[in-house]
Image (cartoon, rainbow, N blue to C red):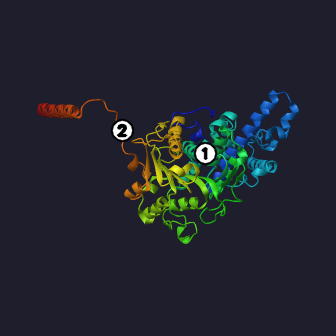
Amino acid sequence: MSADTTTKNGSLGFEDKLWAAADVLRNNMDPAEYKHVVLGLIFLKYISDAFEERQKELAAEGDEEALEDRDEYIAENVFWVPKVARWSHIQGAAKQPTIGKILDDAMDAIEAENPVLKGALPKVYGLPALDKYKLGELIDLMSGIGLGTAAHREKDTLGRVYEYFLSRFASAEGRGGGEFYTPSSIVRVLVEMLEPYAGRVYDPCCGSGGMFVQSIKFIDAHDGKRNAVTVYGQESNATTWKMARMNMAIRGIEAKLGQQHADTFHRDLHPDLRADFVLANPPFNISNWGGERLVEDVRWRYGTPPAGNANYAWLQHIVHHLAPTGTAGVVLANGSMSSQQSGEGELRRKLVEADLVDCMIAMPGQLFYATQIPVCLWFLARDKGNGKFRRRKGEVLFLDARKLGRLENRVNRVLDEADIDKIAGTYHAWRNVGGGYEDVAGFCKSATLEEIAAHDFVLTPGRYVGAEEVEDDGEPFEEKMVRLVEALREQQAEALCANMTETIASRELSVVCSGQREFL
């Protein structure tokens, strides 16, 4: 099935079929190893597709010598794929009993030719537990799915496939899919609001690196310079960390992701980093983060976060890593805005009183591909009295965006360009001098710290923006009230008559049926 096929439910059209084929491989394999098998194969197909597309371009130019010229590929940000690792070679050997070793050798060859991938690719295909016949069938199925062509790179097909597979893996292990992949609608809102043109960009739970990818796209779209941004990240999941490295390498992004995966709370790989921009989608409401071992941690400037929920640990970790004028955008579960459990209300109060909270956004539901947990966006600013934040010191912007977006299917919602522009445009108008910002009932409200205190420091936007104004139709209130009451009485009378008719009919039917039974 072609990857161009798009089903009405918003999928790419082949994920279920691919998952079903891949899942047959699992047998008794350890889940961690099984992830490597599937995701590594998808990555190999991706880079091989890109290589072969570039090769066809060179062939069309009539330069035969260029076909095997490594520089012709590297110059176009395409990995050099040795012959033993090209998909045509892999597919040709799919039915051989040695296909596992052939794939492991292919991964070794790619790493040898592309040092940036050193240690990032799996070599698990020769494991005895892996059914080589089923592996060959999966290779045949994947051969009909394009992943690395220019068209699919533009659609981020690889990201969607990774998202789907990781969410399925995560679901099987009891974790939310948002831990691995953040939908582009959410990432774009974060990037458009923070505008990371230059400086240090940090994601303490970077997953597959989607925040970095979108940041670079933003820079490219605004004619910025990629080398003006330095990317720092950390990821605790071994498979996802490797995937992030592959993702960055594919896009030519130099990212400092550490020498290995590591837990951000217990082994901070960037302890001295003070970032200009932080973009993060931490795992939601995690309870087993080991907080009881970090009670006196230097990062808890505003209070020790509860051991049973890491939301406020993430917020304080991010504040700790912000530069003096740094800003951050963080995705969290809605409960973080109002929870009073385990001292979270007190932590929230201290963050507000320190004037760190810049903007709060209630997002539409159903944005995530794999989980329906409703989310909000926290925007933090280390120094709101500096530069472009001068007018908004002591204020917080509340945005209720729950009505925005459109359903692309029965399950998933997306934000269109106009929605993202409305959110980001409102924010920029609010925070910039002379931006022309005005409160809009039902959508946005600029609240003072005193107003927030009056709401017991609950940060749910709906408490502040109020109800959407209804356009006045010109009818006097007294006349409208009389008309509506009369209409209500008529509807009630009609309903009463309908009920009586139904009751009478029911009795008549009962009599008829009773007589019929006596007749019989």
* SS type, badge 2: loop
Residue ID for mark 1: 195
- Place residue 475 in its image quadrant: top left
User: x and y percent of residue 464 in the render?
Assistant: 39, 49
User: x and y percent of residue 403 in the render?
Assistant: 43, 40
The residue closer to the viewer here, 6 or 90, is 6
Quadrant of the snapshot with the C terminus = top left
Q: Residue at x 39, y 59 (%)?
A: 456
Left or right: 128, with 322 as reference point: right
* Image: 255 above or below 505: below
Quadrant of the snapshot with the N terminus = top right
Left or right: 379, with 479 as reference point: right
Residue type indicated by callout 1: Glu
Residue ID for mark 2: 469
Q: Do the numbered discs 1 and 2 sit on residues whose CB atoms are within 8 Å?
A: no
* SS type, badge 1: loop
Residue type indicated by callout 2: Glu
